[in-house]
Image (cartoon, grey):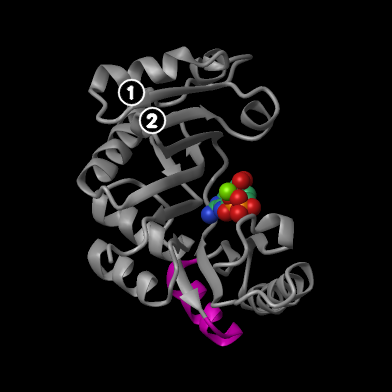
């Protein structure tokens, strides 16, 4: 599916929020590294998709009404085999129905379990005055509690992506502390620039969140993605 067809399909359903599967196929088209996710509507479908991808896998709820999937019991990590996938599928649907009664549930996404990395966030929001603005920060409590984030107005030049990373207080964590290897800063820069280029090419993207991106000593990989587009022009 191309960007245009994904956005058209969402708008036809009256949605502006693209789900993880849709957002990740847009990332793929844009060349931004992310774990590929497929949509399964039954446990058997999830199993055959997991078989094709290789274990371990991750299952997550896909619902336009559930923004924070783990809060709704909608994320199951590190599933080792077919039996674990079937059990996780049923559990996720039950949890989601309980946490968000009446939520529209499209199914469950299936993706490979990524190896652990340092969690960072790459995002874009639309500012009423400045237009698209990129955001970068360290994931988890660093962003939620300490608000350790940096911002740049789109379009970014390569040096802007580099200085965004340098600007966060937690930068030493990416440089490697206590014997930890340094994160691949070049790969993070390229993810930031890739998102900047993607949103510049598609002004209908209003918000984009890669939360988290795993930063590795060699490479970077988005494991969660969310995109909000504008309503169709009338
Ligand atoms: P949400 O933010 O909606 O709760 P996420 O997709 O971000 O859901 O998943 C929650 C957490 O699970 C992530 O922050 C990450 O730590 C972990 N996670 C998600 N997907 C993967 C994956 N493919 N591989 C490894 N860990 C993952
Ligand atoms: Mg997330």
Q: Is residue 230 above or below residue 61?
A: above
Asked if 54 appears above or below 123 in the picture, the reply is below
Q: Is residue 50 left or right of residue 232?
A: right
- In contact (CB < 8 Å): disc 2 and disc 1: yes
Location of mark 1 (residue):
161
Residue 90 percent location from the top left of the image: 70, 79
Return the mark for residue 42.
none
Q: Quick one: which residue is furthest to the front in this view?
A: 234
Quarter of the C terminus within the rendering: bottom left
Q: For the residue labelled by badge 2, is the local secondary structure a helix, a strand or a loop? A: helix
Q: CA distance from mark 2 to mark 1?
A: 8 Å
Q: Residues within 10 Å of mark 2 (few under 14, many from 20)?
A: many
Q: Quadrant of the N terminus?
A: bottom left
Q: Is residue 215 above or below residue 42?
A: above
- Tag of residue 188: 2
Which quadrant would residue 148 be assigned to in this image? top right
Label 1: few (<14), some (14–19) or many (≥20) C-alpha neighbours in 10 Å: many
Please indicate whether residue 21 sits to the left or right of residue 199 in the image: right
Residue 57 lies in what quarter of the image?
Answer: bottom right
Q: Residue at x 73, y 55 (%)?
A: 71
Please give the range of residues in magenta.
Answer: 41-54
Inspect the magenta stretch and tell me whether residue 168 lies in it.
no
């Amino acid at each position: 599916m191309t960007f245009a067809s994904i956005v058209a399909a969402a708008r036809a359903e009256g949605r502006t929020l693209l789900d993880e599967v849709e957002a990740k196929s847009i990332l793929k088209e844009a060349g931004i590294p992310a774990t590929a996710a497929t949509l399964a509507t039954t446990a058997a479908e999830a199993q055959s998709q997991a078989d094709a991808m290789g274990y371990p896998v991750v299952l997550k709820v896909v619902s336009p009404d559930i923004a924070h999937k783990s809060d709704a019991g909608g994320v199951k990590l590190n599933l080792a085999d077919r039996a674990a996938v079937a059990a996780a599928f049923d559990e996720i649907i039950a949890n989601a129905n309980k946490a968000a009664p009446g939520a529209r549930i499209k199914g469950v996404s299936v993706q490979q379990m990524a190896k652990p990395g340092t969690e960072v966030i790459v995002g874009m929001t639309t500012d009423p005055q400045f237009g698209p603005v990129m955001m970068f920060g360290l994931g988890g409590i660093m962003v939620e509690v300490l608000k350790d984030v940096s911002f740049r107005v789109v379009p970014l030049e390569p040096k802007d992506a580099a200085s965004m990373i340098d600007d966060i207080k937690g930068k030493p964590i990416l440089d490697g502390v206590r014997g930890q290897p340094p994160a691949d800063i070049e790969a993070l820069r390229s993810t930031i620039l890739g998102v900047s280029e993607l949103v510049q090419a598609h002004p209908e993207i209003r918000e984009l969140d890669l939360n988290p991106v795993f930063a590795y000593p060699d490479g970077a990989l988005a494991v969660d993605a969310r995109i909000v587009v504008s309503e169709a022009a009338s």
